[in-house]
Image (tube, rainbow, N blue to C red):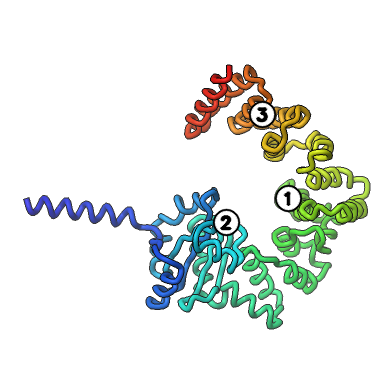
Amino acid sequence: MKITLYILTLVVFLASTSIAQGIKFEKGTWAEIQAKAKKENKHIFVDAYTTWCGPCKWQSKKVFPQKEVGDFFNKNFVSFKLDMEKGEGVDFAKQYKVRAFPTLVYFNPKGELVHRTTGANPAKVLLKQAGEALNPETQFVSLQKRFDKGENDLDFLKKYIAATKGAYQDFTKPTEMYLNQLGKKKWATAEGWAFIKEFVVKSSLDAFVYVVQNQGKFEQLAKKKKEVSNFIERGLSYDMQKVARSKDQNKLEAYKSKLNKLFGKEADKHIIKTEYFFYRSNKEKGLKYASKYLRTSSNVNELAMAAWQYYNQFDTPDHLNAALEWIDKAIKLDYHFRTYNIKVKILMKMKRYKEAKKAAEETLRLAKKDSKQYVKMAQKQLDEVNAKL
């Protein structure tokens, strides 16, 4: 009997040990975590998350529980999870300027910020980042101090720019310094293009203009077919969104003028997109510019998001008919339950219940075929439609 109990106890112990292989996150207050780290002479790792953040959930479920991740973090860090929208997390987010999720924040045993990265990553990348957080030569804050003191050789700048980008901070100034030192003659080389495509994210930079004016040269260097055109679209979108957020008509006109100078006859397609972003939430003018731009779009996500926005924000027949047109176009491009789900909602809002039922039935069929975890949601939606008939 004693032997049997011993074996059962051992099995339970081994099972619990195998389950608890990942990162051990401590409970308590931020002050208690800091005190524990100081006492144990360990760095602090903070997973700054929100409950609605998909990448946060993925990382917590798929990455943090891995044995190799747990072994490294439990040895070197006192780990702490902090919701940025609740309790102490709100002040933490303000103090450490956490604006994207997840942000992974690292402190030394004294409680001083030394490193930060943004985004969810697989175990290999996470472990590399955590290793950099322990090394003064690669810590973001250490590199920042060296930059502020005037260090600016090419190798250092590249390292600092990468760390700054990973920390979700503005890296425009060191990027311009790097490119100026590298020299324009080397921009259209394999070395120059590798740097530009990764770190030039604003259309205001000279290197961006150079790529537009010498697109053929860079297409010869590119490894993928749409690499250069995607780079240009990314840079333009960054500034388009900035102009749109300003809601300043003068800035809109100035940016349109800039596009005309930069692209000449090809500027119209970029101007149409800029105006779409600028007027997107304007009830009077938004529909005109949205229809003009989305008529040319073949981007499923863009069409679906526009349809979803109009469904949520507007009630007029013109706006809802436009939303229905865009979601139908998205469905033709990507026959998926997600796009059909939006169509059902729009039709329901328009009180076109018979059409909504057909769309809801198709949503359920596609969910059963491709995304079984959403079957209950699709069935519930169909039940709601049937209740209206």
User: Which mark's residue is nearer the viewer, 2 or 3?
Assistant: 3
Q: Classify residue 185 as left or right of residue 95.
A: right
Q: Is residue 319 above or below residue 51?
A: above
Q: Which residue is mark 1?
A: 227
Q: Classify residue 9 as left or right of residue 307.
A: left
Identify which residue is drawn at 71% across, 74% down: 154
Q: Classify residue 59 as left or right of residue 229.
A: left
Identify which residue is drawn at 28% across, 54% down: 16
Marks 2 and 3, the one that precedes in the sequence: 2
- Disc number placed over residue 186 in the picture, else none: none
Where does the C terminus fall, quadrant-wise? top right
Marks 3 and 1, the one that precedes in the sequence: 1
Q: Classify residue 166 as left or right of residue 248.
A: left
- Disc number placed over residue 346 in the picture, else none: 3
> Residue 359, located in which quarter of the rendered image?
top right
Find out whether the residues at labels 2 and 1 contact each other: C-beta distance under 8 Å: no
x, y (%) of residue 38? Answer: 42, 77
Q: Which residue is mark 2?
A: 101
Amino acid type for the residue under numbered disc 3: Ile
Q: Is residue 156 visible?
A: yes
Q: Is residue 370 above or below residue 117?
A: above
Q: Is residue 384 above or below residue 216?
A: above
